[in-house]
Image (cartoon, rainbow, N blue to C red):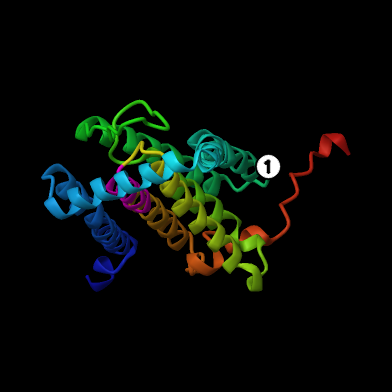
Amino acid sequence: MTARYCGPDAALGVRLLLTTAVTAAVSMPFALALVLVESRWPPLYRLDQTAAERLHEAALRHPGWVRVLRVLTDFVWDPVTMRLLVALLVLWLLTRRAWRLAAWASVTAVAGALTGVLTKIVVERARPHLPDPVAHSPGFSFPSGHAMTAVTSCAVLLLVLLPLVPRAWRPLPWALAITSAVGVAYTRVALGVHWVSDVVGGWLLGLAVVTATTLVFEAWRADTGQRRTDVTREGLEPELSAPAPEPPLDLRDA
């Protein structure tokens, strides 16, 4: 009787409950941000307005800086660019026969994009309306798609490629990922196409999506008997640093 309650089914149930609980906990900050935005909480409203006005004044005084910001947001940190990098990563993983890691990267990117679009449609928050705007962007404002895509894409690239980076150098890709997420958020607010709360919401929602898919991947590793990893130091699949497996030998070609 005891074995029946401690077998694989029970272990899977416990993992599912823990995964759900952790995902819900990570999603709480975004849920709180959404409630504050929808209720137009006065302190948050004042923060959004003040930041938008001051950064807009700075943009009008420095047109050269605006051109730099536009290059960064429209090309370097553009969602299309970030998703293209993830697509190239998935193709590389497929050449290495890392099927499940490729599936995780694909699902994380697609889930992040769809979740962001659906949230924008539900919330329907208007973008800032500023005098003499220096940039324009279509669609709704909350959450920032640029900020969310930066978080999900950088997380995918980081957690997949980290095992290939020497241990002494691993703080560097973390610094690059954080700089990209913060940098793209700054460009969106400085150009007057998003509120501060929009980019914070994008960060939080992107983090929730990555956490959920990562927990599922970790559960798969546990079910297949592989060791648990510290994803922040080793990445999702430390075995990726090993040479790619050779394709099976076809005796007919011998």
Measured as percent of width and height from the top left, residue 97 is found at 64, 45
Q: Which stretch is magenta?
A: 195-207
Q: Residue at x 67, y 47 (%)?
A: 96
Quarter the N terminus occupies? bottom left
Tag 1, which secondary structure? helix
Measured as percent of width and height from the top left, residue 146 is found at 42, 40
Q: Nearer the viewer, residue 243 or 168?
A: 168
Q: Nearer the viewer, residue 43 or 216?
A: 43
Residue 112 visible in image: yes
Check the image and name the residue furthest to the right. Answer: 254
- Membership of 182 in magenta stretch: no
In the shown orientation, is residue 110 left or right of residue 247? left
Q: Nearer the viewer, residue 148 or 162?
A: 148
Q: Is residue 35 above or below residue 19?
A: above
What residue would you read off at disc 1? 95
Measured as percent of width and height from the top left, residue 13 is found at 27, 59
- The three-letter code of the residue at mark 1 reads Thr
Q: Residue at x 41, y 42 (%)?
A: 188
Q: Residue at x 64, y 72 (%)?
A: 167
- Quarter assignment of residue 162: bottom right
- Membership of 203 in magenta stretch: yes
Q: Residue at x 40, y 51 (%)?
A: 210
- Quarter assignment of residue 18: bottom left
Q: Is residue 26 above or below residue 66?
A: below
Quarter the C terminus occupies? top right
Q: Is residue 10 above or below residue 113?
A: below
